[in-house]
Image (spheres, rainbow, N blue to C red):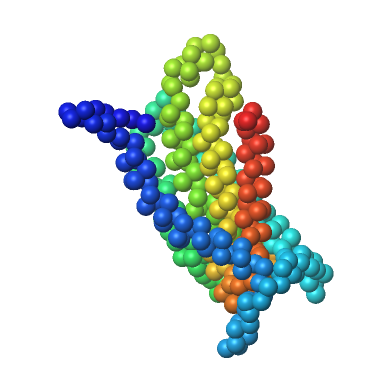
Amino acid sequence: MAKRKSSGNRSISYAKWGYIFIIPFFVVYAIFTLYPQILTIYNSFFEYYRDGLTIVGPRFVGLDNYKTLFATNHAGYVPIFKFLGNTIWLWVLGALPQFVVAMMLALFFTSTRLNIKGQQFFKTVIYMPNLIMASAFAMLFFSLFSQVGPINQFLISSGIASKPINFLGMQVSVQTLIALMNFLMWFGNTTILLMAGIQGIDEALFESARLDGSTSTQVFFNITMPLLMPIFIYVFITSMIGGIQMFDVPQVLTNGYGIPDNTSTTLIMYLNNFLGISKNYGMAGAVSVLLFIITALLSSIVFKSINPNRK
């Protein structure tokens, strides 16, 4: 503990002030994060919902809510598995090009050979889509690709299509639009984070490699990527967590229905059906707990897979 002797030979501890300064964080965390998490787990073991104006419960039902989650519905599939698959697939569709493009742009802007001018301007431009609200972005695409939207009007007037195409009624087009919006909103943020990581690498390492005759590919895989790995892991895992929590874009684009045939319904949309529509807090709690477990497991698997040498 850091101490300093005063003129009166009294020992003054400065380390305690550090603990005092972080107390507000723990207080806020306990009230607004930890307590709701505990309450969610608690509610997941109860039957607790609203039937009209009548509130049913809370009545302890044990693991019945979890059993219901894994039960097959009338359509012949387990909803939680289907929506988990939808969520991961939609994230992969948007994240794969996002990381490829972001890495290319980060290498391009940080290259000392190219010495790109006006980097601040380009950083601002590529980050701007991230500032747009996801719901507004989704409404824009909904208007563009609706059957009376400008995209269909252009296709018909140019003779490419004889009648309006129902872009929002086909699985391929809906999933592609969701992935495209997620890509456009987040590739700028990913690019800036990767740029910061690359700029933190000692330039002398790159110069030494070039003097030894290393190609750009060799420099990337043997110097840039290994040293960038901590930042890359952070960006990848946070992107995956954000993808698992995907809600606003598919919710607005499909009007909450996950059309067609729930192929664009995500886990959070499924949770919202219990929390916001049916007011079934018991089932909502069970979905939330399961969502937390899935997120923790996937994050651990990804962390161990990308960084296998980490103890």
| Among the 4 quarters of the image, the one containing residue 304 | top right
Residue 84, position in %: x, y?
Answer: 69, 58
Horizontal placement of 58 versus 33: left or right?
Answer: right
What residue is shown at x 67% (from left), y 48% (from top)? 297
Quarter of the image with the N terminus is top left
| Among the 4 quarters of the image, the one containing residue 119 | top left
Residue 55, position in %: x, y?
Answer: 60, 83
What residue is shown at x 31% (from left), y 41% (from top)? 17
Q: How many marks?
A: 0
The reply to whether residue 137 is in sight is no
Residue 144, position in %: x, y?
Answer: 52, 67
Q: Is residue 52 above or below residue 120?
A: below
| Residue at the extreme bottom | 53
The reply to whether residue 230 is in sight is yes
Task: Decide which of 12, 181 is in the foreground and name it.
Answer: 12
Horizontal placement of 68 versus 116: left or right?
Answer: right
Task: Decide which of 160, 7 is in the foreground and name it.
Answer: 7
| Residue at the extreme left | 7
Task: Decide which of 216, 240 is in the foreground and name it.
Answer: 240
Quarter of the image with the C terminus is top right
| Residue at the extreme front | 9
| Residue at the extreme top | 212
What residue is shown at x 43% (from left), y 59% (from top)? 132
What residue is shown at x 62% (from left), y 45% (from top)? 299
Q: Is residue 183 above or below residue 114?
A: below
Residue 271, position in %: x, y?
Answer: 62, 67
